[in-house]
Image: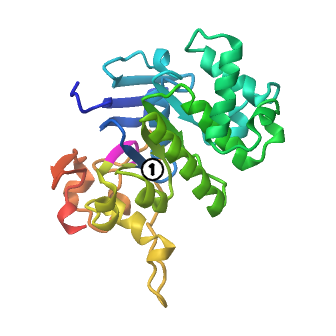
Amino acid sequence: MRSDVLLSVRDLRIAFDGIEAVRGLSFDVRPGEVLAIVGESGAGKSLTARALLGMLPPGATTGGEVRLLGETDLAAQRGRRIALVPQDALSALSPVHPVGDQLAAAVRSVSRVPRKEARARAVAALERVGIPDAARKARAYPHEYSGGMRQRAVIAMATINQPDVLVADEPTTALDEERRDQVLKVLAEQREAAGAALVLVTHDLDVVREHTDRALVMYAGRLTELGPSEEVLTRPLAPYTAGLLASLPQNATPGRRLPTLPGTPPTPGVLPPGCAFAPRCSLASDTCRHEEPEPQQVDGRLVSCHHWEDA
């Protein structure tokens, strides 16, 4: 494993009942960087994120390899070297235990410290994410927190042991723009304080543009494009990436109908032959319909497309 790689994913495959939902995905996460994973629903983003933590649902079978600092036992590293910021903070927190007790338990799960010290760390973690009167709020239950405060609490829990990698799965879904920006600011501050890398699963390309270093675009369980976020979003090489960007309302031309990607993503197990995006792609040729493109290096990026030069 290269010294400049913190987390290495090679040929990751995730299947249910023999049907692959993630198909041969490879990428690296570097120390301190923010990597976005983007794509339409069903692309395999959240499954990939869960695989990084060793938290795949029952019935999943995997192939390939995920290494964190050279280690493959991801469950043993969870909470210590790698941690999750979940999408639904209310579901992630136990409704029958005070929030402070839950953070203290996270400390004691990786460190043999007295309960009093773990409790003090929990209060300090809540203070760091901007929860007012943290000592009192540590005694409160999740239902006594607002939605934004619950999201801050799960960020505090994820960062309390200063992991090397944070994995955030749609952490701002269902939040309004103001709360979204607040949560992203807190997440960035805590990530930087811990010196951690961040893998951010999101469908919000504005978040990708403003808050990430590199973007991994997925389609039908595979890598479509991977490169610096600014380059991917301003000069996409893959037709799929270009189609996603063209369909954003802010990119609309006044007086003209907003472009959309025709059709819908394929269902795992009933993929078309060749490139999975070919039925929706205006550039598709006979080659696309018969040969699945492999990722290739183009100007420091990876792109899986036979006709990337025409995108």
Q: Residues within 10 Å of mark 1 (few under 14, many from 20)?
A: some
Relative height, residue 244 to residue 287 (above, below): below
Quadrant in which the C terminus appears: bottom left
Q: Position of residue 259 (x, y in %)?
A: 44, 75
The magenta segment is 219-223
Quadrant in which the N terminus appears: top left
Relative height, residue 139 to residue 185 (above, below): above
When asked about the image quadrant of residue 132, the answer is: top right
Q: Residue at x 44, y 85 (%)?
A: 253
61 left or right of 156 in image: left
Q: Position of residue 257 (x, y in %)?
A: 48, 83
Visible residue check, residue 88: no
Q: In this figure, what is the number of numbered marks?
A: 1
SS at badge 1: loop
Relative height, residue 203 to residue 242 (above, below): above
Q: Amino acid at mark 1?
A: Pro
Q: Residue at x 38, y 66 (%)?
A: 243
When asked about the image quadrant of residue 121, the answer is: top right
The residue singled out by tag 1 in the image is 266
Q: Position of residue 120 (x, y in %)?
A: 68, 24
Magenta segment main secondary structure: strand
* Outermost residue to the bottom: 255
Q: Position of residue 284 (x, y in %)?
A: 27, 62
Visible residue check, residue 68: yes
Q: Residue at x 15, y 56 (%)?
A: 299
Specify whether residue 275 is painted magenta.
no
Relative height, residue 49 to residue 110 (above, below): below
Q: Residue at x 57, y 47 (%)?
A: 186
Q: How is the image coloured?
A: rainbow
